[in-house]
Image (cartoon, grey):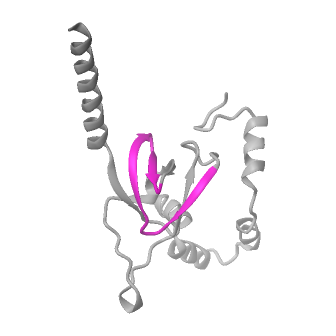
Amino acid sequence: MFTKKLACIIGGLGLAATVTLAASTSIMSIQVRKAEIRETPSYLGKIVTTMAYGDKVTVQSGNGAWMQVLSAGQSGWVHSSALTKKNIVMKSGAGAQTTASSGEMALAGKGFNSDVEAQFKNNHKDVDFSWVDKMEKIKIPISDIREFAKDGKLAAGGGVK
């Protein structure tokens, strides 16, 4: 008798956990051209896959500005700025909608975009931007960044270990 009650209680808890999980998940769309899905909630996390604009994901949980997502059996973390609750419908031709890249989204979030850059350059004609342009073209492999962070004892979320 006790075993049956215990089994019912455990089964009920399992059902409640399933209902809670289902209620806490949501379907969202990728709103940037290319979203990098990472192994950990950090820009230093290993990229496990990439997703394209309009792809759908199931948000499983969150950690600050990072969302744990699931799509096509692949689980990982993506920054919330790459997600939207809007249902994105792909269009072709003249009615097609465009979106900003993840880099443009990050700069726009800081109040900086190509229009602001053009205006700044126009207002500061005496400044040589050629070195800035060269630096923007530098691509550092993520393995080098991880090694730098490890050597410097930097924590993935910021600060020092």
User: Quadrant location of residue 88?
Assistant: bottom left
The picture places residue 26, in percent across and down from the top left corner, at 32, 50
The picture places residue 50, in percent across and down from the top left corner, at 56, 61
Q: Decide if residue 23 is on the left or right side of residue 58.
A: left
The picture places residue 45, in percent across and down from the top left corner, at 62, 45
- Residue range of the region highlighted in magenta in the rendering: 47-72
- Residue in front for this viewpoint, 13 or 23: 13
- Is 56 within the magenta? yes
Q: Residue most toward the bottom? A: 94
**In the image, is residue 15 above or below residue 148?**
above
**In the image, is residue 8 above or below residue 147?**
above
- Residue in front for this viewpoint, 159 or 145: 145
Q: Residue most toward the top? A: 2
Query: In which quadrant is the C terminus drawn?
Result: top right
- Residue in front for this viewpoint, 115 or 18: 18
Residue 100 visible in the current orientation: yes
- Per the picture, the main secondary structure of the magenta-coloured stretch is strand
The picture places residue 69, in percent across and down from the top left corner, at 45, 49
Q: Residue most toward the front? A: 1
Residue 128 visible in the current orientation: no
